[in-house]
Amino acid sequence: MSANIAAIANLKGGVGKSTTTVMLADGLAYCYGLDVLVIDLDSQANSSQVLLTELGLDQVADQDKGAHELLGQFVRGEPPIAGPFIVPNAVSLEELRKAEEEDDRKGWVSILPSHPKLRMAEMSLEEDWYSTTGTPSTLTAALTEHFRGAVEPLLSLYDVILIDCPPHLSPLARAALATAETFVLPTLADPISIWGSKQFSDWVTEHVRSDLADNSFVVVTRFRNTSLARQIRADIQDVYLKDRYFGAVIPDSISVLKAMDRPSLDSYNTFRGKYGSVTADVRRLAQRYADFMYQRTGVAWEMVRR
Amino acid sequence: MGDGETLGAGEYLDRLFEVIREEALGNPEFAARLVRATGGQVTFPERDREVLLNPVDIAAREGAEGVYDQFASMDVSTLRRVLKAHNLATPVDVRGKKKEDLLGMLSRRAMERVAARSSLKPD
Ligand SMILES: Nc1ncnc2c1ncn2[C@@H]1O[C@H](COP(=O)(O)OP(=O)(O)OP(=O)(O)O)[C@@H](O)[C@H]1O
Ligand SMILES: [Mg+2]
């Protein structure tokens, strides 16, 4: 087992990166029984908050877990080890919890969470680094090395690693992009978002990954079925992001908002109960990702639940 | 006040308060807000309580015990509905739970939500 590392990324804010991260994590763990690790590198901590709740975020930060601790390790010049900062249980689906309870684990979600503390940690690191002879590029290179080193031992422990990226290109964000093998690119079907998505795609292709197009999985999110939106969606596929793999279309739905509001850290719901009217869309997202991976690697994940 | 009709201050206020009073009697939520604005306690007929009492609101104002007291008279199926309606629990969470467990869950999770979602206030 060697995990596939995917960055869920777009420079444009609010296009559904965090929501897609969570839906993909749940969908892959539920439908394919995969062991998924979410790495939240955005100091907004949205996917962490969704999976662990607000209270849970503070609790795990008190236990010295989280991406800011990994940054602290880098600052202190210690060797890269991410394990101690990971929260092993970020499962909210009843079916997964139950299987685990019956000693028949099929699919699991863990998280290296973020916390608002990450913002200060990043800022002070950048300030220190640039105050000597460091530049953004050298910091990015050093962070990439540390991040890759930290992720390396995790590859044998998980099937999929999903990195929820922030809507900016800080050195840490660039380190994540440089570490990923595949790129999930959520975008809205509106003129500004598709322009932004194309800009981002071009920038990454030029500066980080020349093979981005071949490894991109595009997800149109918050889709409202209007003629304008349909037209724009066609434009994304035929013009703006031509030759990318088109993942799925997630409708604009209150069910998505509800699914992102976990009542409490000890609260569980069934897959269908959690996703309500978008259950089939989340399943399709996972299926399309499995197809995308099969096409790239020839490895077929087996569906274990519907 | 059409057709050049003029009203004295007393008559004007009588009419205004009559409208407010009528609205309050027909709209318990509005009534609750009115009375709360004056710092008073509102009581509701039992059939309105389920829809009107917001556990998170009560947790913020009266604490966990307040939640417990206000909902203690409700039966199991009503408590389940309240928990789900305010997204404090999923159907899985409430399945097979006794009344005491549901009340405990309601007050604990309502307090949790208040703690998590209140913004920092200057002292
Ligand atoms: N399918 C959907 N239907 C309805 N609302 C949605 C949907 N997807 C996302 N949203 C809402 O849109 C907003 C942005 O989503 P999200 O936070 O996932 O985007 P993001 O790209 O991660 O944002 P950021 O750039 O700030 O990290 C959120 O308020 C989210 O709840
Ligand atoms: Mg986000």
Image (spheres, coloured by chain):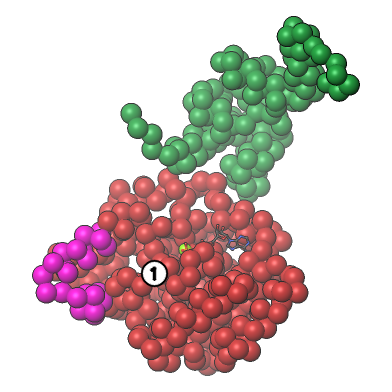
Q: Quadrant of residue B56?
A: top right
Query: Residue A208: x and y, percent?
Result: 35, 85
* Magenta highlight range: A121-143
Q: Quadrant of residue B53?
A: top right
Q: Is residue B30 left or right of residue A163?
A: right
Residue A11 seen anywhere in this rendered image of the structure: yes
Q: Is residue A31 magenta?
A: no
Q: Which chain is green?
A: B
Indicate which quadrant contains ligand 1.
bottom right
Q: Please state which amino acid type lies under the numbered disc 1.
A: His
Residue at 66% from the left image edge and 56% from the top image edge: A254
Query: For the stretch drawn in magenta, what is the main secondary structure?
Result: helix
Q: Where does label 1 land, which residue?
A: A168
Q: Residue furthest left?
A: A132
Q: Nearer the viewer, residue A36 or A235?
A: A235
Q: Nearer the viewer, residue A240 or A176?
A: A240
Residue B25 seen anywhere in this rendered image of the structure: no
Q: Residue furthest right?
A: B3
Whether A214 is drawn above or below A182: the answer is: below
Q: Is residue A135 magenta?
A: yes
Q: Which chain is red?
A: A
Residue at 66% from the left image edge and 69% from the top image edge: A223
